[in-house]
Image (spheres, coloured by chain):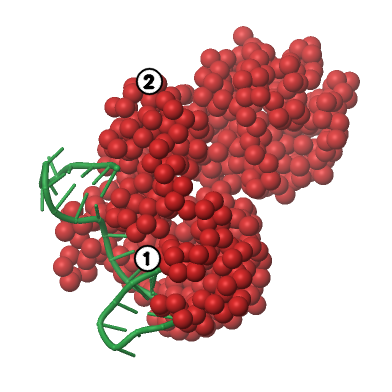
Chain colours: A red, B green
Amino acid sequence: MDNIEFAKIFWEIAEFLELKNENRFRIRAYQKAARNIEALSENLEEIYKKGGIKALEEVPGIGEGIAEKVENIIKTGKLPQHDKLLAQFPKSFISLMGTPGLGPKTAILLYKKLKIDSLEKLKKFAKEGKLRGLPGFGAKKEENILKGIELKERVKGRFLISEALDYAKPIVESLKKLKEVDQILPAGSLRRWQETIGDIDILVTSKNPEKVMKAFTSLPQVDRVLAKGSTKSSVVLKNGMQADVRVVDPNTFGAAAHYFTGSKQHNIEIRTLGVKKGLKISEYGIFKGNKRIGGKEEVDVFKAVGLPFIPPELRQGTGEIEAAKKGKLPKLIELSDIRGDLQMHSKYSDGANTIEEMVEKAKQLGYEYIAITDHTKSTRVAGGQTEKEVLKELAYIDKLNSKLKGFRIIKGAEVDILPDGSLDYPDAVLKELEVVIAAIHSNFKMEKAKMTKRIIKAFQNKYVNILSHPTGRLIGVRDPYEVDMEEIIKAAKDTGTYLEINSFPERLDLCDIHAKRAKEEGVLISIDTDAHSAIQLEYIKYGVMTARRGWLEKKDVINTQPIDKLLKLLYAKRR
DNA sequence: GCCGTTTTCGGCCCGACTGTTTTCAGTCG
């Protein structure tokens, strides 16, 4: 069972305990355990196999009780307590969860008083005006529930980080123009560079919050205003995304930036540390009794609780505070550390631009090298090249290189891994390439053990340098194929093969968690774009941010190396 | 249910907005 499935069980337990109005700290304990399990780089079952119950209890948020439950799930495949809770409500009741404006208290009230046990029923009752009259219910609340259902039906899930950044940009630009706006900072999951974004959070400092609220809620992008207060407003944008703006006084920018960046769990942990030191930390600053002792700069918050600054990408509430306490925070890789891009396509296969145009763009980005890695013959839909064709391309690249000064084009290909684990080109052709990127482009539905074997067989070829988009997922479109990532990482280590973080916003594959796991095992990473046009070379930022979320440092990434060292790394397997 | 350089028991982050309440509960982040 993978960690996501374990976590789901505990999320559901928390949800049902909430409905039953259980002790909220007990609920929070389940939520925290679920969140930490999701973020765990090692599989929970592996941890248990290695060290039993004791090892499980080492995981933050897992204590005696939850460790026993995990053991029970591993041994029997289920959890009686979970089944019991599920049995108390009809299955359709779950569909009510997550409706904006409808929390557990309301849901249970509706269930008890009106036997509402599904989203359809709720919609019907609300439309017929049958909700008003219940304790605490008026016409307005009824209307809001209908709007919440509509919103839930219209916006299915979350947005890619790239989309969210595109939506946020014009809003930030517009607000920046107001003379009342002092500083402005996109915060929340956007600032933490999460791979998907639920809503856009923007922090503004201003002496005149009302003006900012008015300007924000009347922007042309706004479809509907959900809430408008004197310092905080929420709207739904025309593209269906929610955006929140919060205004604070300029001298509290730092504390507010920290609070508004989150994550929620990170904030709770920081504030708890504050409480232990006799401090109160909120978006308004750091307080000792009634005295404000800091909050203008974000670092004030960390200093107050005796920690170094923690970069936003690490603020996931999954061990970064522990690491900071011990002085073990990584020195995260920076965008400027990247010296070149090792996967891209040209007109020789399905790219939109010529090799020369890709070089031009790469130079603009300050790169020292790129690898051209066009598709191979099996991927015909993507213009895959035969052996003869690719050899012609390589000869052309030699010619270009002889004219280039201070820039190097590395000869490569994105070679298909065939269903039996063999490669799409014979070794005689592979040896002409300086970098071989291996990738799965067919037979995605293979059974897990077979798929894992298929990839590991490819690793055993001494010409294979990098496994591209290792899980094949397309966020929100296609699930990852079934593959044992632990085995893949071990095999990569044993064979000297590198793993890719593919920077395409819908891929981000490896994801942060797997990247972290690879690093822990000493496997080096290549961050590349897989660009199919010159402009897409700019996607590299999404890959670098994913690496940062995976705690990667400059030394963990091969394309931070100068060309001579990089080529050595690429030829290391061939010796 | 978790957790411990004040604790193995008694704590557990903090505040804005809404709608319905005449002082607050529910929801959200």
**Which image quadrant: the C terminus of chain A?**
top right
What percent of the width, then of the height, locates residue A469? 65, 33
- Residue A103 figure quarter: bottom left
Q: Is residue A494 left or right of residue A472?
A: left
Q: Identify the secondary structure beneath mark 1.
A: helix
C-alpha distance separating marks 1 and 2: 43 Å
Q: Is residue A249 left or right of residue A176?
A: left
Q: What number is the disc on residue A256? A: 1
- Residue B15 figure quarter: bottom left
From this view, report whether residue A247 is shown above or below residue A1.
below
- Residue A318 figure quarter: top left
Of residue A177 and residue A472, the one placed in the foreground of this image is A472
Q: What number is the disc on residue A282? A: none
What percent of the width, then of the height, locates residue A534? 74, 46
From this view, report whether residue A264 is shown above or below residue A556.
below
What percent of the width, then of the height, locates residue A492? 56, 20
Of tags 1 and 2, which is closer to the observer? Answer: 2
The residue located at (56%, 25%) in the rendering is A484
The residue located at (58%, 62%) in the rendering is A119
Q: Is residue A117 visible?
A: yes
Residue bearing the label numbered 2: A50
Q: Chain of mark 2?
A: A
The residue located at (30%, 50%) in the rendering is A26
The residue located at (75%, 27%) in the rendering is A443
Mark 2 Cα shell of 10 Å, populated few (<14), some (14-19), many (≥20): few
Q: Is residue A178 visible?
A: no
Of residue A456 and residue A96, the one placed in the foreground of this image is A96
Label 2 amino acid? Lys
Q: Residue furthest top?
A: A575
Label 1 amino acid? Ala
